[in-house]
Image: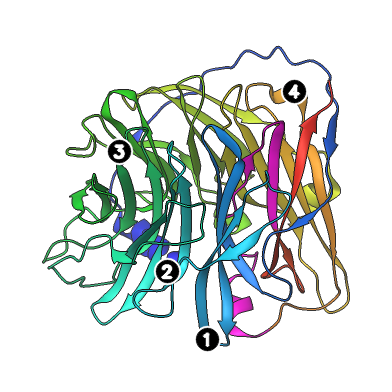
Amino acid sequence: MIFNTLLSLIRSRIPLILIAGALGVADSSVAQTFLVGPTVRVSRPGEIVAEFFAATAPGNAQLMTASAIKEVTPGRSLCAVYVSRNGGNVWSEVPAWPDTGFQPAFDPWVAIGTDGTIHATGIARTNMGTRAIYTQSRDQGFSWSSARAVTPLPAKSLRFGADKDCLTVSPDGTIYVAFSQVLTSPVGAGELVVARSTDDGLTWTPRDAGVNAVPNGIVTASGGTVTVTFVGGTVPGYGTVTSTDGGDTWQAPVRLGELNLTQGLPLPSIVHDSLGRIVIGDIGGSTSPQLEISIESNDGSVAQQWQLPLPDSDTCSDGRLIQPALAAGPDGSPAFQVACKVDSTVSTQGRLEVWLYPSIDQPTLGPVLVKAIQLPAQRLSQDSFAQRFRDGGDYWSFTWTATGWLNMWVDPRSGGGPGVLRAASVTAMD
């Protein structure tokens, strides 16, 4: 759904504010070596999954959660939720969405609050159109609340229902869910909606963020700041929109860069880091792809922008850069993950590589090769699930551990499409 939505948004030519120029970043990197741990399976054996998001509990690095779209039967999918209670070494699927009631089919997202509550959202098909739905677990995933529509809007969408949700939880327990939804009739410019709940998801207050765009990440910061990153605008670009009053009102959107559609569909990633910064990462560049990092202050203003060097790899130079993602731990600099892929054909093998930049603030530190996968010499399967999620979906994620990072990827079953969700830890040795 998201690709067609994006093209529609690009054609709509809703203007954004352009940030001219880019500030440099100081680099005090030193040589480091990193240990890549053994590969761990997250999804169940034999399950075919795509598009996932992961999170670690603040104050408890042993508790992690992830959610991915899994193919249940041909033509039917579900947002499966996985939990690890031992720091990412062992994962199990948990019954987040029972057979009765709402069940999300795509766009999974998860978060863990400071109290250890696991929160999950996704997009479900209902008799009122597609809706963002929500559930939570207070016992590390063993039991879950009834699924509820985030905002059962009285107005009906004229073009599409809810699409591309994302989720965050502020330190005070307020839950924010962003998604794309037409609110007005006739259709107005604003389609990015942010809904807020202060009662554990029982009721929601939706607000139009005032930008015609598709979200792909939301964070909170001190002073009532809520920031959403999105794609869409006058040109194929990406940016942010910020509220400084808890989501009641929204500032003008800020354009951070061009969207490089030659590589696929890169979606920006956003975190609020331990230094109090709002950090956005994406694959930009109108012609040649570049790895772009932007830093925003809590008021939504841009403080710095710079690029990370591309991995020194034939796969990256000959293939495509896909799946940009950021993760922020409880201290230090955020990390950035990107994948490179050379597509296989009927006569040639392909290759998929997962690379980690351990510190976005040290560009010359260089990335670490976490995983390299040979793709068999065959074309991508023609079944609908594989066709829809060509690169394992439009977005991936990863998270942090007590000693470093837990990198995650979709290990494709054939040709680079959907497959098994796997992970490996990356730890600095010196």
Mark 3 residue type: Pro
Q: Are marks 2 and 4 in contact (CB under 8 Å)?
A: no
- Write down the region rendered in magenta: 382-409
Q: Are marks 1 and 2 in contact (CB under 8 Å)?
A: no
Q: Secondary structure at mark 3?
A: loop
Mark 1 residue type: Gly
Q: Earlier in the sequence, mark 3 or mark 2?
A: 2
Of residue 193 and residue 14, the one placed in the foreground of this image is 193
Q: Residue at x 37, y 72 (%)?
A: 124
- The residue tagged 3 is 253
Q: Residue 214 in magenta?
A: no
Q: Residue 395 in magenta?
A: yes
Quarter of the figure that contains the N terminus:
bottom left
- The residue tagged 1 is 75
Q: Say which quarter of the image contains residue 290.
A: top right
Whether residue 284 is visible to the viewer of this picture, yes or no, is: no
Classify residue 220 as left or right of residue 58: left
Q: Are marks 4 and 1 in contact (CB under 8 Å)?
A: no
- Disc marking residue 364: 4
**Crowdedness of circle 1 by 10 Å Cα count: few (<14), some, many (20+)?**
few
Q: Earlier in the sequence, mark 2 or mark 4?
A: 2
Of residue 240 and residue 129, the one placed in the foreground of this image is 129
**Crowdedness of circle 2 by 10 Å Cα count: few (<14), some, many (20+)?**
few
Q: Are marks 3 and 2 in contact (CB under 8 Å)?
A: no
Q: Secondary structure at mark 1?
A: loop
Q: Earlier in the sequence, mark 4 or mark 1?
A: 1
Horizontal and vertical percent for residue 57?
53, 40
- Disc marking residue 4: 2
